[in-house]
Amino acid sequence: MGTPSIDRKHADTPRRKRMKAENQRRRRAHIKKNGKNSLKGKDYDHTRKAFTSVKVNRGNGGKGTKPRKSKTA
């Protein structure tokens, strides 16, 4: 198999493991209370502490995921 990729190493950090566990707990509780279809197309947003659409959650509120560097040439 070889060495794990950088993405895998990042996903296995203690912080990410805690976030994944929190997500799993919240999803299970939400499904139990509201039903399976209530989470269709939604992700748990750790910043807002709520379920939001995948588009909103992964888009970082329209700011993207990384700050852009301006090119001055």
Image: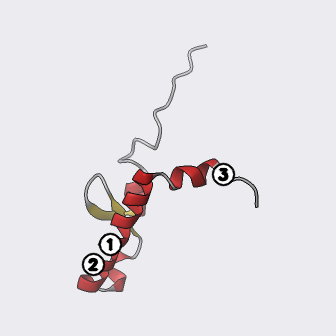
> Which label belongs to residue 4?
none
C-alpha span from label 3 to label 1? 27 Å
- Estimate the spatial distance between the alpha carbons at disc 1 and disc 2, rounded to whole Å: 6 Å
Kind of residue at badge 3: Ser
Q: Nearer the viewer, residue 1 or 45?
A: 1
* Distance in Å between CA atoms under marks 3 and 2: 32 Å
| 1 versus 66 height, above or below | below
Q: Are marks 1 and 2 in contact (CB under 8 Å)?
A: yes
Residue closer to the observer: 55 or 32 = 32
Residue appearing at x 30%, y 71% in the figure = 26
- Relative to 62, 26 lies left or right: left
Q: Is 57 or 18 nearer to us in this picture?
A: 18
Q: Report helix, strand or loop for mark 3.
A: loop
For disc 1, the neighbor class at 10 Å (few under 14, some 14 to 19, many from 20) is few
| Amino acid type of the residue that numbered disc 2 sits on in the rendered structure | Ala
Residue type, numbered disc 1: Arg
List the residue tagged with mark 1. Answer: 25
> Residue drawn 38% across and 66% down?
21
Residue wearing tag 3: 5
Give me the residue at 37% from left, 71% from top.
24
